[in-house]
Amino acid sequence: MVTVLFFAAAKDAAGMEQLRLEVSQSLSLVQLQQRVLQLVPALQPLQSLLLWAVNNQYAVPAQVIESGDTVACFPPVSGG
């Protein structure tokens, strides 16, 4: 099982704080993103803006996701 956590505008668009996905084999971050966007189409308008982290580390598209991982999905963070 992979847990996807949504933050800020991603959480608002998704209408949920987290999504748990059953995975039978490892997959790339890109494959996980595609699956999340299919299950939560309200995130599609934000797709190009979203950042992803795996187990508290920023992730690249080829990042391998394994069962037990926690993936965070969030918009860019800014402050002042």
Image: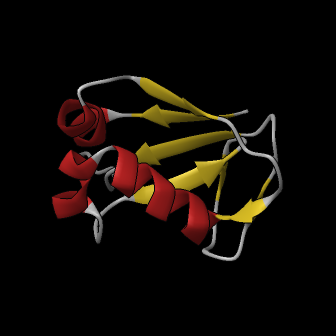
> Which of the 4 image quadrants contains residue 40?
top left
Q: Where is residue 55 in the image (x, y as percent from the top left)?
A: 72, 42
The chosen color scheme is secondary structure
Q: Position of residue 60 (x, y in %)?
A: 63, 72
Callout count: 0
> Which of the 4 image quadrants contains residue 10?
top left
The residue under the point 37% across, 45% down is: 39
Q: Where is residue 14 in the image (x, y as percent from the top left)?
A: 26, 35
Foreground pick, 70 / 78 = 70
The residue under the point 69% across, 76% down is: 62
The residue under the point 45% across, 46% down is: 73
* Residue 73 left/right relative to 48: right
* Residue 8 left/right relative to 60: left
The residue under the point 28% across, 65% down is: 49
Q: Is residue 72 above or below residue 26?
A: above
* Residue 11 left/right relative to 52: left
Q: Where is residue 1 in the image (x, y as percent from the top left)?
A: 73, 33
> Which of the 4 image quadrants contains residue 11?
top left
Q: Is residue 48 above or below residue 45?
A: below
Residue, far front: 24
Foreground pick, 77 / 3 = 3
Foreground pick, 30 / 79 = 30
Q: In this view, does 18 lie above or below 64?
A: above
Residue, far top: 17
